[in-house]
Amino acid sequence: MKNKLLFTFLILAIFSANSQIERTNEKAFIPKGKWMTSGTISVNFFDNKTTDINNDEEANGESDYINFNFTPKVGYSIAENWVAGIGLGYTYSRNKGKSFEKDSLTSHYQYTTNGYSINPFVRRYVSTGKNLLFFFQGETKYQYSKSKDINNYPSENNDYHTSANLFFIGIMPGLNFFLNNHWALETTIGRAGYEYTKSSSDSSNIHDQQSNNFFIDLDLSDVYFGISYFF
């Protein structure tokens, strides 16, 4: 399988309060009584082509995938270096492909998912210098998603829908590095917590599923980078 294109675009913006950060004794801090808005946008897409030669028969396949995620947030600093807020999220993904044998179409499929989430959070900042603030974010998340699977073969159709519910509670560490009183670079590094999922399908061949998972993730899929703006 060969990747023809792999592109990931991630923006973590706009992170703001109704006043810029303040500094005391050369340490930055988030004042009490300030509002904050933030958001993440990510786009990931790629396509693949495969070729398999077996017993002088040539089979080919092609597929493409796209994923889009948008998560705006709003928060309020309930105390110095403490921010409580809520986020809303939307996710769309599509994966489709075709299979050929000697240039004849043998099958094709398309799998699409739409997801919606709500995400209350509390963030505790730790002042370490005039340009750097670490934070620990405790959060809960509920997500509902609906998927449609289309598998079409020359002799049959196999279409079905799947719905899933996800609940997460855990922590996420990160930091802000301030370039000045308004602009900062931001990153989150991994997450740890508990996740519960339950899914059901209208296909008689797929059973309802449930999973419980306690985990600590520190891989690159849970590291996010962005830019923040305070005003």
Image: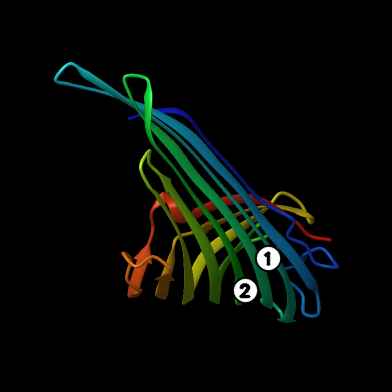
**In the drawing, what numbered circle is on residue 27?**
1
Residue 124 left/right relative to 196: right
Residue 224: percent from left, percent from top: 54, 52
Residue 98 left/right relative to 226: left
Residue closer to the observer: 17 or 9: 9
- Residue 139 in sight from this viewpoint: no
The residue to which callout 2 is attached is 118
Looking at the image, the residue that sits furthest to the front is 155
- Select label 1 or label 2 by which is in front: 2
Q: Which amino acid does label 2 sit on?
A: Ile
Q: In which quarter of the image is the N terminus?
A: top left
Residue closer to the observer: 66 or 119: 66
Residue 122: percent from left, percent from top: 61, 78
- Colour scheme: rainbow
Residue 229 left/right relative to 119: right
Q: In this view, does 175 lie above or below 121?
A: above
Q: What residue type is labelled 1?
A: Lys
What is the C-alpha distance between the residues marked 1 and 2?
33 Å
- Residue 142 in sight from this viewpoint: yes
Looking at the image, the residue that sits furthest to the top is 56
Residue closer to the observer: 129 or 72: 72
Q: Which of marks 1 and 2 is nearer the N terminus?
A: 1
Residue 75 falls in image quadrant: bottom right
Residue 192 falls in image quadrant: bottom left
Q: Residue at x 62, y 73 (%)?
A: 118
Helix, strand or loop at label 1? It is: strand
